[in-house]
Image: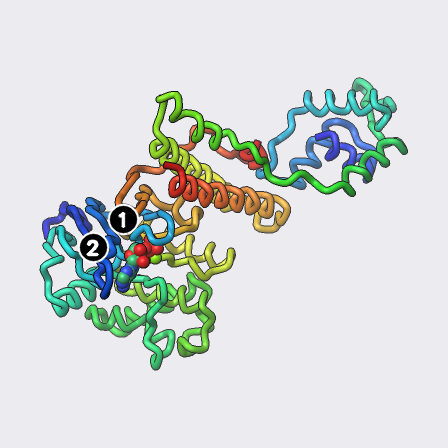
Amino acid sequence: MRQSLLALLAKEPAHGYELKQALETIFGGAYPSPNIGQIYVTLGRLEKDGYVRSVDVEQANRPNKKVYYITAAGREALETWVEEPTEGPRVRDEFFMKLVLAPMTGLSDRMALVNRQRRHYLALMRDLRELAERTDPANRVALLLIEGAMLHLQADLDWLERCQEDLP
Amino acid sequence: MTADAPVVRAVNVVKIYQTGGLPVPAVRGVDLTVEAGEFVAIMGPSGSGKSTLVHMLGGLDTRTSGEIWLDGRRADTLSESGWAVLRREKIGFVFQFFNLVANMTVADNVELPALLGGVSPRQAKERRDYLLGELGLADRAEASPAQLSGGEQQRVALARALANQPRLLLADEPTGNLDSRNTRDVLRLLGKVHGQGQTIVLVTHDARVASMADRVVSLLDGQIVDDGAIPKSRRRPLGAAGDVVELRS
Ligand SMILES: Nc1ncnc2c1ncn2[C@@H]1O[C@H](COP(=O)(O)OP(=O)(O)O)[C@@H](O)[C@H]1O
Ligand SMILES: [Mg+2]
């Protein structure tokens, strides 16, 4: 969230609600709609860190509007974020922890765990597929985000199969 | 043959291959019932017996023991010619390796089963145009199979299998050679025909395809280890302002 707000502000100054709308337009249905409170909390922190500043803009018949703009330090932080390599997939997987540990406790057997998880992944895949069908075909960003989630899910299912084959 | 008989009923079906050396048990006691209108996805690791199972259900491979009933009729005891008739009347099959007739055009490959099934040439042509259109192959109708890419051949094989509106569609990895866009066409068509009541039993590795099914059957070492509905996800539905990213956290 911090970085996406900085990136949007690097393009042009904006107030909180405009930032929320911009995120929704760019990423479409595939992105968790940020709530406005979260956005203001994040902007407050960015301001405290010296990455953004705000000015009050007077509005006729309405309370003043706070417009945020990026500082030089903010631009530098954004540049660092863009340039450093992004973390790969997680190594610790919660389901894998369950799969390894739960049978030791006698709570569940592996076959049942894997089967339940497979059905759950397929249910998630159905949601993603339906979301993709509902998404505006012109929104390439949203569709690619969904496709990425689908490919991750496919990898998770393939891994599940490997676990079922190789764990006694 | 009764109206409410399951389309498929397999009872303790076993397949042991014996080619020279040691016997290979490929399917080890499978019970499977598929009701009319159901869409069942069969999943499982490579070598778990998926192809062997659907081949037996379509009479393309003989069972070692057990019973296979199709549409209320005992089928495993049929002769090869008896199976050929049953397949022509009731089953559309998409093989893993397509099996198109090499010296016929795409259009004729797709029309043939409908014509053999006794449909009028005009209806056969209409159905063919519809299916090829849905699969993005309208402009390939006059090509011969050898002129097609693997993905195109695979889609033609699906069109052919659906030409007759068969009682049962059996498919073995029908999207194995397709890129993302062509897979989407196949998914859309499967969704449509399933919506019209088509019974489908389909082997797949592709979770997008499997997620279309009502039910998923998992094979491991020739046995069914899971058989049940794909649940409603417990998450709130992905809405207009959804949350794919949360899936990963
Ligand atoms: N014609 C055959 N002769 C001998 N063994 C076979 C034959 N076909 C398949 N098998 C063996 O049977 C097992 C199941 O194969 P198959 O049904 O093709 O699995 P899947 O489709 O799940 O990958 C494998 O061990 C495979 O090697
Ligand atoms: Mg196979």
Q: Chain of mark 1?
A: B
Residue B141, numbered circle: none
Q: Quadrant of the C terminus of chain B?
A: top right
Residue under label 2, please give it: B15
Q: Is mark 1 within 8 Å of ligand 1?
A: yes
Residue B73 place in picture, x, y as percent = 10, 54
From this viewpoint, is residue B241 visible? no
Q: Secondary structure at mark 2?
A: strand
* Amino acid type, callout 1: Gly
Residue under label 1, please give it: B222
* Amino acid type, callout 2: Lys
| Image side of residue B75 versus residue A138, left or right | left
Q: Residues within 10 Å of mark 1 (few under 14, many from 20)?
A: many
Residue B125 place in picture, x, y as percent = 32, 71
In the depicted structure, whether residue A110 falls above or below residue B97: above
Between residues B173 and A87, which one lies in front from this camera angle? A87
